[in-house]
Amino acid sequence: MKFSDFMNVKAIRSELTADDKEGVINELVGALVEAGAIKEDERGSIVKAIMKREELGSTGIGRGVAVPHTKHPSVDQLVGTVGVSSEGVDFNSLDGEKVQLLFLLVSPPDRPGDHLRALENISRQLRDDTFCRFLKQSKNADDIQQLLEEADNNQFVS
């Protein structure tokens, strides 16, 4: 699975303004609403589901990265977006570091394979230091979209 299979490029945010975990999740879900990938009336329910998932254990996986995600019946296909926080957000990450890169995913409950493949793709790409560094330095959504395309074309992971 590639980023282009599930990332909504219209929802990419190169400069998140929220400064806490729930705030950035709300901001990214809101970006998916604005992009037409999620219905406005499902926004609160999806944020709540992601926060409930966070209670099980932080999706802050370390090295300045978090992958908040949930399965939700309101979506009929996997959707995701990327957000960058230059200041960083406390996400209770495994390594205690603030999170700068967020990859948010929402998938239908009946498509667990897609959900797992997307998570695997994200984690594989994020093991590449160059990819992460370039993402953190992105100035706008177009830069991020280009990096995702380059990752899809295997220009980072060896």
Image (tube, helix red, strand yellow):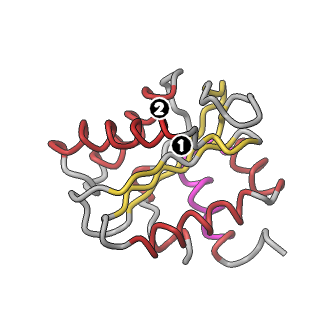
Give the image quarter of residue 146: bottom right
Specify the amino acid type for callout 2. Answer: Val
Along the viewing direction, whichever of 113 and 44 lies nearer the viewer: 113
Q: Secondary structure at mark 2?
A: helix
Is 12 above or below relative to 115?
Answer: above
Specify the amino acid type for callout 1. Answer: Gly
Asked if residue 94 lies left or right of residue 44, the reply is right
Q: Which residues are magenta?
A: 138-150
Image coordinates of residue 140 in percent, x first then y, are 57, 44
Residue ranking furthest to the top: 19
Residue ranking furthest to the front: 56
Is 54 above or below relative to 141?
Answer: above
Residue marked by disc 2: 24
Q: Give the residue at x 29% y 55%.
A: 72
Is 130 above or below relative to 88?
Answer: below
Q: Give the residue at x 39% y 38%.
A: 52
Image coordinates of residue 155 in percent, x first then y, are 76, 73
Image coordinates of residue 77 in percent, x first then y, are 31, 69
- Residue 83 disc label: 1
Q: Quadrant of the C terminus?
A: bottom right
Task: Point out the tag, 1 or 2, that comes first from the N-terminus.
Answer: 2
Give the image quarter of residue 87: top right
Image coordinates of residue 96 in percent, x first then y, are 74, 28
Q: Secondary structure at mark 1?
A: strand
Mark 2 surroundings: few (<14), some (14-19) or many (≥20) residues within 10 A: many
Task: Check whether the beta carbons of the residues at disc 1 and disc 2 lie within 8 A of each other.
Answer: yes
Asked if residue 61 lies left or right of residue 25, the reply is right
Per the image, is 147 magenta?
A: yes
Alpha carbons under labels 1 and 2: distance apart: 8 Å
Is the stretch drawn in magenta largely helix, strand or loop?
helix
Per the image, is 64 magenta?
A: no
